[in-house]
Amino acid sequence: MKILKYSGIALLLAGGMIASCSKNFLEKPSYGAMTEKDMSTKAGIQVLLVGAYAALDGQGPGNATLGGGSGWMASPTNWVYGSVAGGDAHKGSESPDQPDINTIATGQESSTNTYFNAKWKAVYEGVYRCNTTLKLMRLTTDMTADEKKQVEAECRFLRGHYYFELKKMFNNVPLITDTTTDVLQTNTVDIWPFIEADFTFAMNTLPETQPVIGRANKWAAQIYLAKTYLYEKKYPEAYTLFKSAITTGVTSDGTKYALLKNFEDNFDAAKKNGSESVFAVQMTANDGTGAITNANAGEMLNYPYNSPFGCCGFFQPTQDLVNSFRTDATGLPFIDTYNDPANVVKNDMKVAATADFTPDNGYLDPRLDWTVGRRGIPYHDWGLHPGAKWVRDQNSGGPYAGKKMIFWQFNQNLYRDNNSWAPGSAINVVLIRFSDVLLMAAECAVETGDLLGAEQYVNQVRGRIADNPASWLHKYLVDTLPMKGFSTTDMAANYKISRYPDAAFGSQAQARKIVYFERKLELATEGHRYFDISRWGQTGADMMNKFYQYESTITTDLVGANYKVKRNEYFPIPQRQIDLSVKNGKSVLTQNSGY
């Protein structure tokens, strides 16, 4: 099985290093630069296509983390925009560090925030590479019509992804295509139809399998189209496509879509590209470039502070999120009352690392301890999380650490990258995984009145972990480095989880509430939460303001936080882009409402 690798040459060629031909002999391209003629061949187009995939990691020109830089601003995990902004996590570290995240976390961001401009540039870099590939492909003479159609389908799939990212973040964005002659376009035209068209073409054209695992196939395009319909609230259209993919869909290497037996395998570099990976950004460690650009550079800040990882204490899960994993005696969550005092999960806030601490002994969903690092619980095979020792400032970020994107100790020589001042890793960024597909289908089922279908999809997700206690976190981690003094059979906590009974889905309102909550649990810290909340309208706004009210009693970083309808559904258009997009003395870009 081949895995798509993003080469340095592809980055250079697709990142604006193509020199145009000129009739003036004084206007010669620089030595080493490639001309349009050079790249308008079958081999050149393939290199450009790989470059279009390479932009998925957000580490393009101006953002690349080459021993420094700001690649985390455009991380494909959207940990700032999807998880910190959505209440999954605090910024972490300490208040003065990366202060632009502070206002994003509180819903008080402005158009001059540097993070938005970095993200905008990184995603439009992907659009540019797709458009460039399509334009130069039309000039080739050594490709068949079918070969061109396949490249077009992959480019349009990728362009659909990039524009989907821009749409869900900024809503009103300019549409630049491979036929656009003037890049100074207005942002007043709704681009959903264009995104639909790109994914539809890709779905109808791409093969079911690919010779390279990292490349998109028909089913990834179909699921992205269904997700587009979901965001547009075209629930019947989305539901039809989701159901077809769930029943028949396969990964690009032909593996039938299915939930992995172990929840935690989704976040393990040694087990990536499995049956649950619909489409992922392929990451690799120690690729010979001397940098961590291809090794999850967007996550480089998000390791516990003062720990074996070296940096940097950002991205700390919230108490609100941790409490959400509390279950009752039947194994079900407290959807409406999870933050009530009786349900709060015990933490070690303001408890010195040298003082005694006993972790919570109440019932908990097992997914908690594969998502959140908390004191007294094994942190993969790195030992027990020591609490305050690994936290830069509990008052600002709380007592927890992220866990899903952390590599293991026993095989770190394979999957850790030390070519920068903070680590990289080979853990893929899975943009869409199969459990997400099941839950999106469940949401469509609720909105189309198929409550039985919604129940079945939700319970399929919960059943994966409920039916497999062997995958729950043990005090002793089997098949990893031994942790002396701990039992090989005891669980790390008091885990209890079950499927929902039929009665739970007795009304559309209650079914909707269950689906929303299950998305919070299953996809926690994966960059989805803010965008879910935004599309849920007033319901989402209520969720965010309740979160602010509760969490601000624990930490100091959310003072003044507020989520306003008709403002916070989208982020502001970067002021830098407004300033640059001037035609006839006036900017062609219009700022979003409320900014």
Image (tube, grey):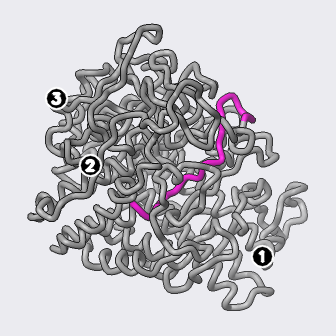
Amino acid identity at mark 1: Ser
Quarter of the figure with residue 104: top left
Q: Amino acid at mark 3?
A: Ala
The N terminus, quarter of image? bottom right
Q: Is residue 482 visible?
A: yes
Count of marks placed on residues: 3
The spot of residue 333 in percent (x, y) is 22, 45
- Residue 326 located left or right of residue 187: left
| 1 and 3 marks in contact (CB < 8 Å) | no
Q: Which residue is mark 2?
A: 593
- Residue linked to disc 3: 342
Residue 419 within the segment the image draws in magenta:
yes
The foreground one among 498 and 591 is 498
Q: Is residue 98 magenta?
A: no
Please provide the residue range marked out in magenta. 418-435
Label 3's element?
helix
Height in image: 170 above or below 548? below
- Indicate the position of residue 206 as horizontal and vertical percent values: 57, 82
Residue 458, percent across and down?
A: 29, 62
- Mark closer to the observer (1, 3): 3
Q: Which mark is residue 40?
A: 1
Q: Is residue 254 above or below residue 58?
A: below
Q: Is residue 575 visible?
A: no
